[in-house]
Image (cartoon, rainbow, N blue to C red):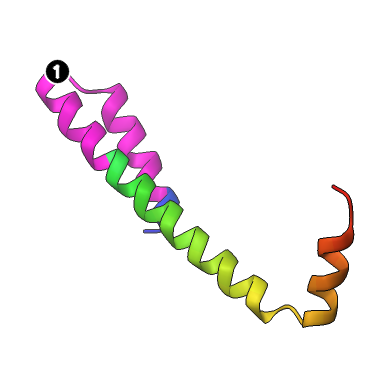
């Protein structure tokens, strides 16, 4: 199961929660899963940027976006 699958599953569980305590537990799990996925994506993007040759990084940094 991918992180996206787990997040999607937790969204469905939150929508189907019967009572407030069940909802709160699922939301806590969802927040944790979203944070872990965010941290993972941030680290992957940082590694990717470090792999780009310096010349390309300099060119990208000069472009007005």
Q: Residue at x 44, y 50 (%)?
A: 4
Q: Quadrant of residue 12?
A: top left
- The 10 Å Cα crowd at callout 1, few under 14, some 14 to 19, many 20 or more, is few
Choose between 19 and 36: the one closer to the eye: 36
Percent of width and height locating residue 38? 45, 52
Q: Residue at x 42, y 57 (%)?
A: 39
* Up-down relation of residue 39 to residue 32 (above or below): below
**Bounds of the magenta segment:** 5-29
Q: Residue furthest left?
A: 21
Percent of width and height locating residue 2? 41, 58
Q: Residue at x 81, y 62 (%)?
A: 61
* Up-down relation of residue 28 to residue 15 (above or below): below
Percent of width and height locating residue 21? 10, 23
Q: Is residue 19 visible?
A: no
Q: Is residue 55 visible?
A: yes
Residue 54 located left or right of residue 16: right
Residue beneath disc 1: 20
């Amino acid at each position: 199961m991918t992180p996206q699958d787990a997040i999607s599953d937790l969204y469905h569980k939150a929508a189907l929660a019967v009572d407030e305590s069940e909802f709160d537990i699922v939301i806590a799990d969802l927040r944790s899963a979203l944070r872990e996925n965010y941290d993972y994506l941030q680290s992957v993007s940082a590694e990717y940027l470090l792999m780009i040759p310096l010349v390309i990084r300099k060119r990208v940094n000069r472009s007005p976006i």
